[in-house]
Amino acid sequence: MPVLVASDLDRTLIYSSAALALTMPDARAPRLLCVEVHETRPLSYLTETAAQLLTELGDTAVFVPTTTRTRKQYQRINLPGPPPTYAICANGGHLLVDGVTDADWHARVQARLADECAPLAEVHDHLARTADAAWLRKHRIAEELFTYLVVERELLPEEWVKELAAWAEGRGWTVSLQGRKLYAVPRPLTKSAAVREVARRTGADLTLAAGDSLLDADLLLAADRGWRPGHGELADTGWTAPGITALPERGVLAGERILREFLKSARQG
């Protein structure tokens, strides 16, 4: 039976230059491979060792990139190894099969959101009214499924984030702050639901997962084994659960460690 490996991407497997956390002496820094270019600029990296591990993993297990990125943002990434048959974008709103959206899955997601959550327009408008231009840089709607802000993190009031989270909770939405992005996402829009669908289609009887943010908690809980790095929302809040390993590594070396753990567990089956 195949092993399914579902992993978050940003700040779990791939890292911007600001998130690399290269705290070692320069001469001992790992060699890096750029896996994303945006508007002619290199944007995301992993170590060359991680690239080799990911290639081996793609030959060993069903590797499923599982991201909150939109489809357009995901398709900028050029990961090493065989192209994944399945990928999950928009936090589970889109299930890609050979790069193409599965229309039936997307329709099921939309129907559930309509039944269980306040409309996207209501949440988007609330953010527009309450965000302060002093720290707000961008306000975006992603795939007509959720909304997010790009903020100046050091100027963002913690109390405002708490008030937003409480307001959103009563409307069936959740809030997650990841780096300079603050997400408002419908609670039923989950990575775990899409991963379960891939497991059903592939017949996988073992699921491995990794992630760093609160939006990854449901993914980790749905897996048989999971890992979280030493940075990110989950680490900051001390989040853990049975079957979840909290790694000490931070930054790009955490991504390398996660891939080692994936490969070891996939080979053991």
Image (spheres, rainbow, N blue to C red):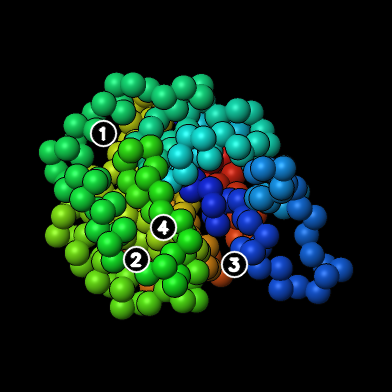
Q: Using the numbered discs, state the Cα–Cα distance from disc 2 to disc 4 in whole angstroms.
A: 9 Å
**Mark closer to the chain start, 4 or 1:** 1
Q: Using the numbered discs, state the Cα–Cα distance from disc 4 to disc 1 in whole angstroms.
A: 23 Å
Q: Residue at x 29, y 43 (%)?
A: 189
- Asked whether the viewer can see residue 26, the reply is yes
**Which quadrant holds residue 183?**
bottom left
Residue type beneath disc 3: Arg
Callout 3: few (<14), some (14-19), or many (20+) C-alpha neighbours within 10 Å? many
Look at mark 4 in the image and give the residue it sits on: 149
Q: Residue at x 30, y 59 (%)?
A: 127
- Residue 46 x %, y %: 68, 51
Residue type beneath disc 4: Leu
- Residue 228 x %, y %: 48, 60
| Residue 254 placement, left or right of 167 | right
Q: Compared with residue 63, is residue 215 higher up or lower down, i.e. above or below?
A: below
**Mark closer to the chain start, 3 or 4:** 4
Mark 2 or 4, which is nearer the eye?
2
**Mark closer to the chain start, 3 or 1:** 1
- SS for dot 4: strand
Q: Residue at x 19, y 45 (%)?
A: 119
Residue type beneath disc 1: Val
Q: Using the numbered discs, state the Cα–Cα distance from disc 3 to disc 2 in whole angstroms.
A: 31 Å
| Residue 44 placement, left or right of 7 | right
Q: Mark 3 and 2 residues: CB-CB less than 8 Å, in contact? A: no
- SS for dot 1: helix
Q: Compared with residue 114, is residue 181 higher up or lower down, i.e. above or below?
A: below
Look at mark 1 in the image and give the residue it sits on: 109
**Mark closer to the chain start, 3 or 2:** 2
